[in-house]
Amino acid sequence: MMSEGRPRADLPEVDAFTRTYWEAAAEGLLLVRRCRAPGCGRAHHYPREFCPHCWSEDVAWERACGRATLYTWSVVHRNDLPPFGARVPYTAAVVDLAEGPRMMTEIVRCPEPDLRIGMALRVAFREEAKGLAVPVFEPGGPAGGIMPPDRRVPGAGE
């Protein structure tokens, strides 16, 4: 996606393979890929066409429950790359999804002093462009399903 003639660094390039993932995110659903090879069965994220654990190509999309725990984070106070400069400070994080994979994301609706390693998180979605939402995480317990409008996180332009 372009902004003022330049590609936006915060938007994914949706292609034929990842379209399923991004369409689900726009509906408020988080997907992971799960290996279906005998003896493996592990989930992974980011989406790939093969299992990064056993290299099998027998992988399928699976709806994640939306729960995670905080593994680590860093609060970003300066970022000169548009549109991130308008978002500072923000919390870049790595979370452990309930399904097993680690995922890079952003923590929202949580002041820095309240962040704790291992804290329970649930997925929310920030709409970045028409029909394009990115998963972010907020404090809380169980999540899953379509996020109601009051749980959607405003985009960078809002």
Image: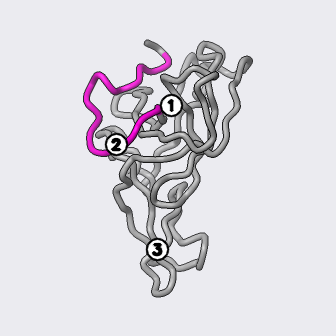
In the rendered structure, the answer to whether residue 39 lies left or right of residue 7 reads: left
Residue lying at 45% horizontally and 21% vertically, measured from the top left? 155
Q: Looking at the image, what colour scheme do you see?
A: one colour
| Nearest to the observer: residue 87 or residue 100 | 100
Q: Which residue type carries mark 2? A: Ala
- N-terminal-most mark, 1 or 3: 1
**Disc 2 target residue:** 143
Name the disc covering residue 59, or none. none
**Mainly helix, strand or loop, the magenta region?**
loop
Residue 9 coordinates in the image, percent (x, y): 61, 31
Residue 70 coordinates in the image, percent (x, y): 58, 42
Using the numbered discs, state the Cα–Cα distance from disc 2 to disc 1 in whole angstroms: 29 Å
For residue 34, above or below residue 121: below
Name the disc covering residue 1, or none. 1
Residue 10 quadrant: top right
Does residue 114 appear anywhere in the picture?
A: yes
Residue lying at 60% horizontally and 19% vertically, measured from the top left? 83
Q: Which residues are magenta?
A: 138-156
For residue 77, above or below residue 24: above
Q: Which residue type carries mark 3? A: Cys
Residue 145 quadrant: top left
Is disc 2 in contact with disc 1, using a CB cutoff of under 8 Å? no
In the rendered structure, the answer to whether residue 35 lies left or right of residue 150 reads: right
Q: Which residue type carries mark 1? A: Met
Does residue 80 appear anywhere in the picture?
A: no
- N-terminal-most mark, 2 or 1: 1
Q: Does the magenta run of residues contain 141?
A: yes
Crowdedness near tag 2: few (<14), some (14–19) or many (≥20) residues, C-alpha within 10 Å: some
Secondary structure category for the residue under label 1: loop
